[in-house]
Amino acid sequence: MPNKVDFNPDYPIIAASDALYERAVGIMTPVTQTLAKGPGQYVNGVAPKYVERGNGARVWDVDGNEFLDYNMGIGPVSLGYCYPKVDAAIIDQLKDGISFSLMHKLEVSLCELVHQVIPNAESIRISKTGADVTSAAVRVARAFTGRKKVLCCGYHGWHDWYISVTSRNSGIPEEIRNLSSTFEYNNIESVKALLDEDTACVILEPFIFEAPANNFLQELKECCLENGTLLIFDEMWTGFRIAIGGAQEYFNVIPDLACYSKAFANGMPIALLTGRKDVMSLFNEEVFFFTTFGGEALSLAAAIATIHEMIAKNVPAYLAQKGKQLKDGYNAIAEELGIHQYTKCIGYDCRSMVTFDASAGNPLELKSYVQQELIKKGILWSGFHNMSFSHTDEDIAYTLKAYRAVLTLLKAAVINNEVSGSLRGNPVEPVFRKLGNASNKPVVKA
Protein backbone atom coordinates (compact mmCIF):
# COMPACT_ATOMS: atom_id res chain seq x y z
CA MET A 1 0.00 0.00 0.00
CA PRO A 2 1.22 3.53 -0.71
CA ASN A 3 2.34 5.65 2.22
CA LYS A 4 0.06 8.25 3.78
CA VAL A 5 0.61 11.38 5.85
CA ASP A 6 1.34 9.28 8.90
CA PHE A 7 4.13 7.66 10.87
CA ASN A 8 4.59 5.04 8.17
CA PRO A 9 6.58 1.91 9.06
CA ASP A 10 8.85 2.25 6.02
CA TYR A 11 9.97 4.67 3.34
CA PRO A 12 7.70 5.08 0.31
CA ILE A 13 7.96 2.79 -2.69
CA ILE A 14 8.96 4.97 -5.64
CA ALA A 15 9.24 2.42 -8.46
CA ALA A 16 7.02 4.35 -10.87
CA SER A 17 9.00 7.56 -10.19
CA ASP A 18 12.26 5.80 -10.90
CA ALA A 19 10.90 4.26 -14.11
CA LEU A 20 9.82 7.68 -15.38
CA TYR A 21 13.23 9.07 -14.49
CA GLU A 22 14.96 6.37 -16.53
CA ARG A 23 12.79 7.28 -19.51
CA ALA A 24 13.70 10.95 -19.09
CA VAL A 25 17.47 10.77 -18.71
CA GLY A 26 18.09 9.74 -22.30
CA ILE A 27 16.12 12.53 -23.94
CA MET A 28 15.97 15.45 -21.49
CA THR A 29 18.97 17.60 -20.58
CA PRO A 30 18.56 17.99 -17.69
CA VAL A 31 15.45 16.11 -16.65
CA THR A 32 13.99 19.00 -14.65
CA GLN A 33 12.62 22.32 -15.88
CA THR A 34 13.25 23.95 -12.48
CA LEU A 35 16.36 23.26 -10.38
CA ALA A 36 14.42 23.40 -7.12
CA LYS A 37 12.08 20.64 -8.33
CA GLY A 38 14.81 18.37 -9.62
CA PRO A 39 16.11 15.14 -8.13
CA GLY A 40 19.25 16.89 -6.88
CA GLN A 41 17.18 18.65 -4.22
CA TYR A 42 15.92 15.42 -2.66
CA VAL A 43 17.59 12.35 -1.18
CA ASN A 44 17.99 10.06 -4.16
CA GLY A 45 16.48 6.64 -3.55
CA VAL A 46 14.03 7.84 -0.90
CA ALA A 47 12.15 10.82 -2.29
CA PRO A 48 9.65 10.64 -5.15
CA LYS A 49 10.72 12.27 -8.39
CA TYR A 50 7.37 12.79 -10.09
CA VAL A 51 4.03 14.04 -8.81
CA GLU A 52 0.65 13.16 -10.28
CA ARG A 53 -1.91 15.36 -8.53
CA GLY A 54 -2.54 17.72 -5.64
CA ASN A 55 -5.39 18.94 -3.50
CA GLY A 56 -5.29 21.55 -0.76
CA ALA A 57 -1.87 21.30 0.85
CA ARG A 58 -1.26 17.69 -0.20
CA VAL A 59 0.20 15.99 -3.24
CA TRP A 60 0.25 12.40 -4.49
CA ASP A 61 3.21 11.02 -6.40
CA VAL A 62 2.99 8.66 -9.38
CA ASP A 63 3.25 5.67 -7.01
CA GLY A 64 0.20 6.88 -5.05
CA ASN A 65 2.13 8.05 -1.97
CA GLU A 66 0.51 11.00 -0.19
CA PHE A 67 2.49 13.95 1.18
CA LEU A 68 1.80 17.11 3.11
CA ASP A 69 3.55 19.69 0.91
CA TYR A 70 5.60 22.63 2.18
CA ASN A 71 7.07 23.52 -1.21
CA MET A 72 3.74 24.37 -2.87
CA GLY A 73 5.00 24.39 -6.44
CA ILE A 74 8.14 26.27 -5.29
CA GLY A 75 5.97 29.24 -4.40
CA PRO A 76 3.14 29.86 -6.86
CA VAL A 77 0.49 27.77 -5.07
CA SER A 78 -0.50 30.32 -2.44
CA LEU A 79 -4.11 29.28 -1.83
CA GLY A 80 -3.76 25.53 -2.32
CA TYR A 81 -3.88 22.90 -5.03
CA CYS A 82 -7.20 22.67 -6.89
CA TYR A 83 -8.55 25.68 -5.00
CA PRO A 84 -12.27 25.72 -5.92
CA LYS A 85 -12.80 29.43 -6.67
CA VAL A 86 -9.68 29.68 -8.81
CA ASP A 87 -10.38 26.44 -10.65
CA ALA A 88 -13.95 27.60 -11.30
CA ALA A 89 -12.66 30.82 -12.84
CA ILE A 90 -10.30 28.85 -15.08
CA ILE A 91 -13.02 26.43 -16.15
CA ASP A 92 -15.47 29.23 -16.90
CA GLN A 93 -12.90 30.98 -19.08
CA LEU A 94 -11.88 27.72 -20.76
CA LYS A 95 -15.41 27.43 -22.12
CA ASP A 96 -14.86 30.73 -23.95
CA GLY A 97 -11.29 30.13 -25.10
CA ILE A 98 -7.66 30.46 -24.08
CA SER A 99 -5.72 32.66 -26.52
CA PHE A 100 -7.22 35.02 -29.07
CA SER A 101 -6.45 37.20 -32.08
CA LEU A 102 -7.25 40.43 -30.22
CA MET A 103 -6.60 41.70 -26.72
CA HIS A 104 -8.82 40.14 -24.07
CA LYS A 105 -11.01 42.11 -21.69
CA LEU A 106 -9.51 40.34 -18.67
CA GLU A 107 -6.21 42.12 -19.37
CA VAL A 108 -7.91 45.38 -18.43
CA SER A 109 -9.71 43.88 -15.44
CA LEU A 110 -6.52 42.44 -13.99
CA CYS A 111 -4.55 45.65 -14.45
CA GLU A 112 -7.31 47.72 -12.82
CA LEU A 113 -7.17 45.38 -9.83
CA VAL A 114 -3.37 45.47 -9.62
CA HIS A 115 -3.43 49.26 -9.90
CA GLN A 116 -5.61 49.33 -6.78
CA VAL A 117 -3.50 47.06 -4.59
CA ILE A 118 0.17 47.62 -5.52
CA PRO A 119 1.45 51.04 -4.42
CA ASN A 120 3.83 51.74 -7.33
CA ALA A 121 1.51 50.39 -10.06
CA GLU A 122 0.97 53.60 -12.01
CA SER A 123 1.46 51.47 -15.09
CA ILE A 124 1.44 47.69 -15.60
CA ARG A 125 2.76 45.12 -18.07
CA ILE A 126 1.67 41.47 -18.14
CA SER A 127 3.92 38.57 -19.11
CA LYS A 128 4.42 34.90 -18.24
CA THR A 129 7.52 34.36 -16.06
CA GLY A 130 9.60 36.09 -13.44
CA ALA A 131 12.65 36.20 -15.69
CA ASP A 132 10.53 37.96 -18.33
CA VAL A 133 9.66 40.87 -16.11
CA THR A 134 12.97 41.27 -14.29
CA SER A 135 14.72 41.44 -17.65
CA ALA A 136 12.14 43.87 -19.00
CA ALA A 137 12.67 46.02 -15.90
CA VAL A 138 16.42 46.10 -16.44
CA ARG A 139 16.01 46.92 -20.14
CA VAL A 140 13.61 49.80 -19.57
CA ALA A 141 15.80 51.11 -16.72
CA ARG A 142 18.75 51.21 -19.07
CA ALA A 143 16.68 52.98 -21.70
CA PHE A 144 15.28 55.53 -19.24
CA THR A 145 18.62 56.39 -17.64
CA GLY A 146 20.83 56.01 -20.68
CA ARG A 147 23.16 53.90 -18.53
CA LYS A 148 24.44 50.31 -18.74
CA LYS A 149 25.41 48.87 -15.36
CA VAL A 150 23.21 46.73 -13.09
CA LEU A 151 23.64 46.00 -9.37
CA CYS A 152 21.76 42.97 -8.09
CA CYS A 153 21.14 41.08 -4.86
CA GLY A 154 19.16 37.84 -4.79
CA TYR A 155 18.00 35.49 -7.52
CA HIS A 156 16.48 37.07 -10.62
CA GLY A 157 16.10 34.39 -13.30
CA TRP A 158 18.06 32.92 -16.18
CA HIS A 159 18.73 35.84 -18.54
CA ASP A 160 22.24 37.05 -19.39
CA TRP A 161 22.33 40.24 -17.32
CA TYR A 162 21.78 38.28 -14.08
CA ILE A 163 23.10 34.77 -14.61
CA SER A 164 26.43 36.27 -15.67
CA VAL A 165 27.28 36.80 -11.97
CA THR A 166 26.70 33.14 -11.04
CA SER A 167 28.57 29.89 -11.52
CA ARG A 168 26.37 29.01 -14.52
CA ASN A 169 27.51 31.82 -16.81
CA SER A 170 28.87 29.90 -19.79
CA GLY A 171 27.70 31.27 -23.13
CA ILE A 172 27.54 34.86 -21.93
CA PRO A 173 30.04 37.29 -23.53
CA GLU A 174 32.53 38.94 -21.20
CA GLU A 175 31.23 42.35 -22.27
CA ILE A 176 27.83 41.43 -20.79
CA ARG A 177 29.35 39.94 -17.63
CA ASN A 178 31.22 43.16 -16.96
CA LEU A 179 27.99 45.17 -16.78
CA SER A 180 26.51 43.36 -13.75
CA SER A 181 27.77 43.26 -10.19
CA THR A 182 26.37 42.10 -6.87
CA PHE A 183 26.13 43.76 -3.49
CA GLU A 184 25.64 42.51 0.04
CA TYR A 185 22.17 42.65 1.54
CA ASN A 186 21.87 44.97 4.57
CA ASN A 187 25.24 46.54 3.74
CA ILE A 188 24.53 49.97 2.30
CA GLU A 189 28.26 50.67 2.02
CA SER A 190 28.62 47.79 -0.45
CA VAL A 191 26.04 49.54 -2.62
CA LYS A 192 27.65 52.96 -2.34
CA ALA A 193 31.00 51.46 -3.33
CA LEU A 194 29.54 50.26 -6.63
CA LEU A 195 27.14 53.06 -7.56
CA ASP A 196 28.55 55.30 -10.27
CA GLU A 197 27.40 57.55 -13.10
CA ASP A 198 26.79 54.52 -15.36
CA THR A 199 24.60 52.53 -12.93
CA ALA A 200 21.17 52.19 -14.53
CA CYS A 201 19.43 50.23 -11.78
CA VAL A 202 19.67 48.40 -8.50
CA ILE A 203 17.52 45.27 -8.37
CA LEU A 204 17.00 43.13 -5.28
CA GLU A 205 14.62 40.87 -3.46
CA PRO A 206 13.34 43.14 -0.64
CA PHE A 207 14.08 40.26 1.70
CA ILE A 208 14.78 36.57 1.30
CA PHE A 209 14.92 35.28 4.87
CA GLU A 210 16.95 37.99 6.58
CA ALA A 211 15.01 41.11 7.59
CA PRO A 212 16.16 44.53 6.42
CA ALA A 213 18.16 46.20 9.19
CA ASN A 214 18.98 49.83 9.99
CA ASN A 215 16.46 51.18 7.47
CA PHE A 216 18.36 49.42 4.70
CA LEU A 217 15.57 49.62 2.11
CA GLN A 218 14.89 53.29 2.85
CA GLU A 219 18.59 54.13 2.61
CA LEU A 220 18.88 52.15 -0.59
CA LYS A 221 16.07 54.15 -2.15
CA GLU A 222 17.70 57.42 -1.11
CA CYS A 223 21.05 56.34 -2.57
CA CYS A 224 19.42 55.43 -5.86
CA LEU A 225 17.52 58.71 -5.99
CA GLU A 226 20.65 60.74 -5.34
CA ASN A 227 22.55 58.85 -8.04
CA GLY A 228 19.81 58.97 -10.67
CA THR A 229 19.57 55.17 -10.54
CA LEU A 230 16.26 53.30 -10.70
CA LEU A 231 15.33 51.01 -7.80
CA ILE A 232 13.69 47.70 -8.77
CA PHE A 233 12.08 45.30 -6.31
CA ASP A 234 12.00 41.65 -7.36
CA GLU A 235 8.86 40.63 -5.45
CA MET A 236 8.49 37.07 -6.72
CA TRP A 237 8.46 35.75 -3.16
CA THR A 238 7.30 38.79 -1.21
CA GLY A 239 4.48 39.95 -3.46
CA PHE A 240 0.97 39.14 -2.22
CA ARG A 241 2.51 37.14 0.68
CA ILE A 242 3.95 39.56 3.19
CA ALA A 243 1.08 41.90 2.23
CA ILE A 244 -1.31 42.12 -0.71
CA GLY A 245 0.77 45.00 -2.05
CA GLY A 246 3.99 43.16 -1.32
CA ALA A 247 7.11 44.30 0.48
CA GLN A 248 6.73 47.82 -0.85
CA GLU A 249 3.45 48.12 1.04
CA TYR A 250 4.76 46.29 4.12
CA PHE A 251 7.90 48.43 4.49
CA ASN A 252 6.44 51.58 2.92
CA VAL A 253 9.33 51.84 0.48
CA ILE A 254 8.08 52.45 -3.04
CA PRO A 255 10.46 51.33 -5.81
CA ASP A 256 10.52 52.76 -9.30
CA LEU A 257 9.71 49.33 -10.75
CA ALA A 258 8.55 46.04 -9.24
CA CYS A 259 8.30 42.48 -10.57
CA TYR A 260 5.84 39.73 -9.61
CA SER A 261 5.11 36.18 -10.69
CA LYS A 262 4.68 33.64 -7.88
CA ALA A 263 1.62 33.61 -5.60
CA PHE A 264 -0.96 35.83 -7.31
CA ALA A 265 -2.45 33.27 -9.74
CA ASN A 266 -2.26 30.15 -7.52
CA GLY A 267 -0.01 28.24 -9.89
CA MET A 268 -1.00 29.55 -13.31
CA PRO A 269 1.86 31.02 -15.42
CA ILE A 270 1.71 34.80 -15.34
CA ALA A 271 3.96 37.70 -14.34
CA LEU A 272 3.64 41.44 -13.74
CA LEU A 273 5.87 44.45 -14.11
CA THR A 274 4.58 47.52 -12.29
CA GLY A 275 6.07 50.97 -12.03
CA ARG A 276 6.26 54.68 -12.65
CA LYS A 277 4.32 55.80 -15.70
CA ASP A 278 7.15 57.96 -17.05
CA VAL A 279 9.48 54.95 -17.05
CA MET A 280 6.92 52.41 -18.25
CA SER A 281 5.78 54.69 -21.07
CA LEU A 282 9.00 53.80 -22.92
CA PHE A 283 7.40 50.44 -23.69
CA ASN A 284 5.00 52.26 -26.04
CA GLU A 285 7.58 53.04 -28.70
CA GLU A 286 11.20 52.81 -27.57
CA VAL A 287 11.58 49.56 -25.63
CA PHE A 288 10.32 46.26 -27.01
CA PHE A 289 8.68 43.86 -24.57
CA PHE A 290 5.88 41.76 -26.03
CA THR A 291 4.96 38.07 -25.91
CA THR A 292 2.26 36.03 -27.64
CA PHE A 293 1.01 34.51 -24.41
CA GLY A 294 0.96 37.67 -22.29
CA GLY A 295 -2.80 37.88 -22.74
CA GLU A 296 -3.54 34.17 -22.27
CA ALA A 297 -6.96 34.22 -20.66
CA LEU A 298 -6.89 31.25 -18.28
CA SER A 299 -4.03 32.77 -16.30
CA LEU A 300 -5.72 36.16 -16.30
CA ALA A 301 -8.89 34.63 -14.89
CA ALA A 302 -6.90 32.73 -12.25
CA ALA A 303 -5.01 35.85 -11.21
CA ILE A 304 -8.16 37.92 -10.78
CA ALA A 305 -9.85 35.17 -8.76
CA THR A 306 -6.75 34.62 -6.61
CA ILE A 307 -6.22 38.29 -5.79
CA HIS A 308 -9.89 38.78 -4.91
CA GLU A 309 -9.75 35.72 -2.62
CA MET A 310 -6.57 36.99 -1.00
CA ILE A 311 -8.21 40.30 -0.25
CA ALA A 312 -11.50 38.81 0.95
CA LYS A 313 -9.85 36.22 3.22
CA ASN A 314 -6.86 38.37 4.28
CA VAL A 315 -4.59 35.58 3.15
CA PRO A 316 -1.28 37.27 4.09
CA ALA A 317 -2.39 37.38 7.74
CA TYR A 318 -3.34 33.70 7.59
CA LEU A 319 0.02 32.72 6.06
CA ALA A 320 1.81 34.66 8.79
CA GLN A 321 -0.27 33.11 11.57
CA LYS A 322 0.17 29.51 10.45
CA GLY A 323 3.79 30.06 9.52
CA LYS A 324 4.54 31.51 12.93
CA GLN A 325 3.07 28.44 14.62
CA LEU A 326 5.37 26.26 12.55
CA LYS A 327 8.50 28.39 12.91
CA ASP A 328 8.11 28.97 16.66
CA GLY A 329 7.16 25.34 17.18
CA TYR A 330 10.26 24.08 15.40
CA ASN A 331 12.53 26.35 17.42
CA ALA A 332 10.86 25.34 20.67
CA ILE A 333 11.41 21.65 19.90
CA ALA A 334 15.04 22.26 18.94
CA GLU A 335 15.64 24.13 22.19
CA GLU A 336 13.87 21.50 24.27
CA LEU A 337 16.04 18.78 22.70
CA GLY A 338 19.18 20.84 23.23
CA ILE A 339 20.07 21.08 19.53
CA HIS A 340 19.13 24.72 18.94
CA GLN A 341 22.81 25.59 18.67
CA TYR A 342 22.99 23.85 15.29
CA THR A 343 19.48 23.95 13.86
CA LYS A 344 16.85 26.67 13.84
CA CYS A 345 14.04 28.06 11.72
CA ILE A 346 14.54 31.58 10.41
CA GLY A 347 12.78 34.06 8.14
CA TYR A 348 9.44 35.79 7.93
CA ASP A 349 6.41 33.89 9.16
CA CYS A 350 4.85 33.54 5.69
CA ARG A 351 7.98 31.81 4.36
CA SER A 352 10.64 30.44 6.66
CA MET A 353 13.67 28.18 6.30
CA VAL A 354 15.26 25.53 8.51
CA THR A 355 19.02 25.96 8.81
CA PHE A 356 21.78 23.64 9.99
CA ASP A 357 25.15 24.70 11.38
CA ALA A 358 28.43 23.11 10.33
CA SER A 359 29.37 22.63 13.99
CA ALA A 360 27.22 19.48 13.99
CA GLY A 361 28.44 18.13 10.65
CA ASN A 362 27.93 18.69 6.94
CA PRO A 363 24.85 20.98 6.72
CA LEU A 364 23.66 19.34 3.49
CA GLU A 365 23.86 15.91 5.10
CA LEU A 366 21.98 17.15 8.18
CA LYS A 367 19.29 18.63 5.94
CA SER A 368 19.16 15.42 3.89
CA TYR A 369 18.70 13.27 6.98
CA VAL A 370 15.80 15.40 8.20
CA GLN A 371 14.25 15.39 4.72
CA GLN A 372 14.61 11.61 4.46
CA GLU A 373 12.85 10.98 7.75
CA LEU A 374 10.09 13.51 7.05
CA ILE A 375 9.39 11.85 3.70
CA LYS A 376 8.92 8.58 5.57
CA LYS A 377 6.27 10.37 7.62
CA GLY A 378 4.50 11.78 4.58
CA ILE A 379 5.92 15.32 4.48
CA LEU A 380 7.40 16.73 1.27
CA TRP A 381 10.07 19.12 2.49
CA SER A 382 13.23 20.72 1.17
CA GLY A 383 14.05 22.97 4.10
CA PHE A 384 11.36 25.61 3.56
CA HIS A 385 7.90 26.42 4.84
CA ASN A 386 6.16 27.96 1.83
CA MET A 387 2.84 28.51 3.55
CA SER A 388 -0.48 28.32 1.75
CA PHE A 389 -4.06 29.15 2.69
CA SER A 390 -4.78 25.40 2.68
CA HIS A 391 -2.37 24.55 5.50
CA THR A 392 -4.55 23.86 8.54
CA ASP A 393 -4.02 23.79 12.29
CA GLU A 394 -4.14 20.00 12.04
CA ASP A 395 -1.39 20.07 9.42
CA ILE A 396 0.77 22.25 11.65
CA ALA A 397 0.19 20.01 14.66
CA TYR A 398 1.10 16.89 12.68
CA THR A 399 4.20 18.54 11.23
CA LEU A 400 5.43 19.56 14.69
CA LYS A 401 4.81 16.00 15.92
CA ALA A 402 6.89 14.73 13.00
CA TYR A 403 9.60 17.33 13.67
CA ARG A 404 9.85 16.21 17.28
CA ALA A 405 10.36 12.61 16.24
CA VAL A 406 12.82 13.40 13.45
CA LEU A 407 14.87 15.91 15.45
CA THR A 408 15.18 13.34 18.23
CA LEU A 409 16.64 10.94 15.66
CA LEU A 410 18.90 13.71 14.31
CA LYS A 411 20.26 14.47 17.78
CA ALA A 412 21.19 10.80 18.30
CA ALA A 413 22.76 10.56 14.84
CA VAL A 414 24.87 13.68 15.47
CA ILE A 415 26.01 12.45 18.88
CA ASN A 416 26.99 9.06 17.44
CA ASN A 417 28.47 10.58 14.26
CA GLU A 418 26.03 8.52 12.19
CA VAL A 419 24.32 11.13 10.00
CA SER A 420 26.18 10.33 6.80
CA GLY A 421 25.93 6.59 7.34
CA SER A 422 22.19 6.82 7.99
CA LEU A 423 21.39 8.35 4.61
CA ARG A 424 19.69 5.89 2.28
CA GLY A 425 20.77 7.72 -0.86
CA ASN A 426 22.83 10.61 -2.15
CA PRO A 427 22.41 13.80 -0.11
CA VAL A 428 20.82 16.92 -1.57
CA GLU A 429 23.02 19.08 -3.75
CA PRO A 430 23.79 22.79 -3.31
CA VAL A 431 21.93 25.28 -5.49
CA PHE A 432 23.80 28.34 -6.66
CA ARG A 433 22.34 31.62 -5.51
CA LYS A 434 24.04 34.99 -5.65
CA LEU A 435 23.23 36.67 -2.35
CA GLY A 436 26.17 38.95 -1.82
CA ASN A 437 29.83 39.37 -2.83
CA ALA A 438 30.46 42.65 -4.59
CA SER A 439 32.26 41.08 -7.52
CA ASN A 440 31.50 38.99 -10.55
CA LYS A 441 32.97 35.83 -9.04
CA PRO A 442 30.39 33.03 -8.69
CA VAL A 443 29.26 31.93 -5.25
CA VAL A 444 27.67 28.56 -4.51
CA LYS A 445 25.17 28.54 -1.65
CA ALA A 446 23.13 25.68 -0.28
Image (cartoon, rainbow, N blue to C red):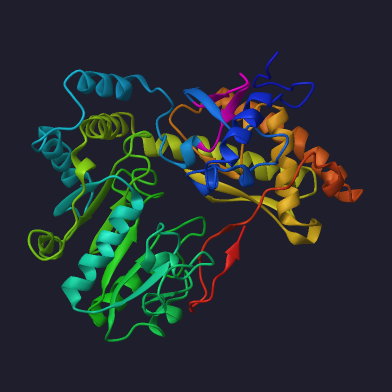
In the picture, which quadrant includes the C terminus?
bottom right
The part of the image, by quadrant, that contains residue 224 is bottom left
Q: Tell me if residue 181 is in the magenta stretch.
A: no
How far from the left and from the top, in percent, is residue 112?
A: 13, 41
Q: In this view, does 312 lie to the left or right of 168?
A: left
Residue 191 drawn above or below residue 428? below
Q: Nearer the viewer, residue 178 or 265?
A: 178
Q: Which residue lies furthest to the top in this view?
A: 1
Residue lying at 58% horizontally and 27% vertically, measured from the top left:
68
Q: Which of 118 and 273 is in front in this view?
A: 273
Q: What stretch is highlighted in magenta?
A: 57-71
The part of the image, by quadrant, that contains residue 138 is bottom left
Residue 312 drawn above or below residue 144? above
Q: In this view, does 301 lie to the left or right of 388?
A: left
Q: Which residue lies furthest to the front in this view?
A: 26
How far from the left and from the top, in percent, is residue 263?
A: 37, 40
The part of the image, by quadrant, that contains residue 204 is bottom left
How far from the left and from the top, in percent, is residue 318?
A: 43, 34
Residue lying at 65% horizontally and 42% vertically, measured from the top left:
42
Q: In this view, does 39 lie to the left or right of 45?
A: left
Q: Across the whole image, how many numbered discs are drawn on residues? A: 0
Q: Tell me if residue 61 is in the magenta stretch.
A: yes
Residue 271 seen in this snapshot: yes
Residue 349 seen in this snapshot: no
